[in-house]
Image: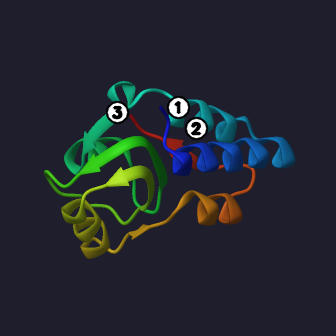
């Protein structure tokens, strides 16, 4: 059974995809509706390898705080550990929700899906 919060997020992503003609949001909605065992789990060290300074990153799964992040990034994920959130903030980055991400980047241009 899927969590009602996840269903609401997926519906919001699909609506954003349709309204802005941005397939990235539809892809994320499909990833959100997958079973939790099929979602990705990434450490900050793994994310750090694939991003550059000031990148906008979406992780379709959980972000854990193992390792460190050497870049200032904007991160959006389905879930993040408190340690991971602190380390992102310490590096000068920020954590945003999907609503804010869609508002700031309606077409999804410049948004990287990592994982």
**Residue 108 seen in the figure:** no
Cα distance, mark 2 to mark 3?
A: 12 Å
Looking at the image, do the residues carrying marks 1 and 3 touch, with CB atoms under 8 Å apart?
Answer: no
Against 28, is 111 above or below? below
SS label for mark 2: helix
Q: Residues within 10 Å of mark 2 (few under 14, many from 20)?
A: many
- x and y percent of residue 97 in the render? 52, 62
Q: Which residue is mark 1?
A: 31
SS label for mark 1: helix
Tell me if 8 is positioned left or right of 90 in this view.
right
Tell me if 42 is positioned left or right of 59 in this view.
left
Residue placed at 66% from the left, 42% from the top? 25
Q: Which residue is mark 3?
A: 40
Looking at the image, do the residues carrying marks 2 and 1 touch, with CB atoms under 8 Å apart?
Answer: yes
Tell me if 32 is positioned left or right of 11 in this view.
left
Q: Quadrant of residue 59?
A: top left
Residue placed at 63% from the left, 62% from the top? 99
Which one is earlier in the sequence, the residue at label 2 or at label 3? 2
- x and y percent of residue 33 in the render? 54, 32
Q: Residues within 10 Å of mark 3 (few under 14, many from 20)?
A: some
Looking at the image, do the residues carrying marks 2 and 3 touch, with CB atoms under 8 Å apart?
Answer: no
Q: Residues within 10 Å of mark 1 (few under 14, many from 20)?
A: some
Residue 28 circle label: 2
Residue 110 circle label: none
- Location of the C terminus (image quadrant): top left
- x and y percent of residue 104 in the render? 67, 65
Residue placed at 60% from the left, 43% from the top? 7
Which one is earlier in the sequence, the residue at label 1 or at label 3? 1
Q: Which of the pair 82/113 is nearer the observer?
A: 82
- x and y percent of residue 73 in the render? 41, 62
């Amino acid at each position: 059974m899927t969590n009602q919060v996840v269903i609401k997020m997926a519906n919001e992503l699909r609506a954003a995809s349709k309204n802005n003609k941005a397939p990235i949001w539809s892809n994320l909605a499909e990833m959100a509706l997958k079973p939790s065992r099929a979602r990705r789990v990434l450490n900050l060290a793994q994310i750090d390898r694939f991003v550059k300074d000031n990148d906008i990153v979406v992780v379709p799964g959980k972000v854990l705080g193992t390792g460190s992040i050497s870049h200032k990034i904007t991160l959006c994920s389905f879930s993040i550990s408190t340690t991971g959130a602190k380390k992102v903030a310490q590096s000068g980055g920020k954590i945003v929700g999907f609503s804010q991400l869609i508002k700031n980047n309606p077409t999804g241009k410049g948004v990287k899906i990592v994982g």
